[in-house]
Image (tube, grey):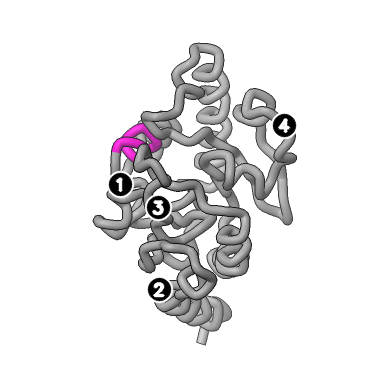
Amino acid sequence: MSAASPRRGALEALQREMRACRRCLTAGYDVFPRAIFSGPFGARVMTIGQAPGITEKDAGRPFNAGSGKRLFQWLAAAGFEETDFRATQYMTSVTKCYPGRTGNGSGDRVPTRAEQALCLPFLEREIELVDPALIIPIGRLAINLFYDSRLPLGKIIGTEKEVDGRWVVPLPHPSGASRWHQSPDNRRLIEQAIVLIRRHRQQLGL
């Protein structure tokens, strides 16, 4: 048995646990209980989004809608093709289940801090067991796991940092509802982030 086999089995067990999880429902949060994540054991890159949206919930895969199209445009500029990336790299989120709509129905609800805390042990175990060399946190909730939450995105996007022996290169949320990534100055910061991601891809031989 290879040294990786116990970790592979542990990841598969974790994924079964995430699929069966009802912690948020038990705590009174009206989420749709279907954990959304994808990717194989041994992936060298991990993306971490905020939470699944309604189309992700329906399709059962991360970044499935318009925001996914924009995300994969950015990743394509870094040299990653979508089909191959989805098959070979790991995609997850801060909270695993669709949190439902906002009270006024204007969009998807942002998971509360309590919901994030309930899901955090899952994410920490995913990182440990997948063991990626590069983490790409996407959007503020994911970025806050690695960067000071008081820093504006303009001071974060286009930078990289090493955390526990892994490189972290953040991206803004690619949602069409977000105006941040539409600013010319912020697009230049995204281009800087893409350059960093491309360099790490090349160093990893991907």
Point out which mark residue 52 bears. Answer: 3
As shown in the figure, which amino acid type bears the numbered disc 2? Arg
- 67 in the magenta segment: yes
Residue 125: quarter of image: bottom right
- On the image, numbered disc 1 is attached to which residue? 64
As shown in the figure, which amino acid type bears the numbered disc 4? Leu
Q: Residues within 10 Å of mark 1 (few under 14, many from 20)?
A: some
- On the image, numbered disc 4 is attached to which residue? 151
Nearer-the-camera pick, 136 or 89: 136
- 73 in the magenta segment: no
Bounds of the magenta segment: 66-71
Say if mark 1 contacts mark 2, CB within 8 Å. no
As shown in the figure, which amino acid type bears the numbered disc 1? Asn
Could you tell me which residue is drawn at 57 percent across and 22 percent down?
A: 189
Question: N-terminal of the two: label 1 or label 3?
Answer: 3
Q: Residue furthest top?
A: 184
Could you tell me which residue is drawn at 54 percent across and 83 percent down?
A: 6
Say if mark 3 contacts mark 2, CB within 8 Å. no
Nearer-the-camera pick, 116 or 128: 116
Instruction: Name the side, left or right, on which 76 lies relative to 55.
Output: right
Q: Residues within 10 Å of mark 2 (few under 14, many from 20)?
A: some
Q: Position of residue 34 (x, y in %)?
A: 36, 66
Q: How crowded is mark 3: few (under 14 residues within 10 Å), some or many (20 or more)?
A: many
Q: Is residue 199 above or below residue 142?
A: above
Say if mark 1 contacts mark 3, CB within 8 Å. no
Marks 4/3: CA distance? 25 Å
Q: Which-is-in-front pick, marks 1 and 3?
A: 3
Instruction: Name the side, left or right, on which 168 lies relative to 28.
Output: right
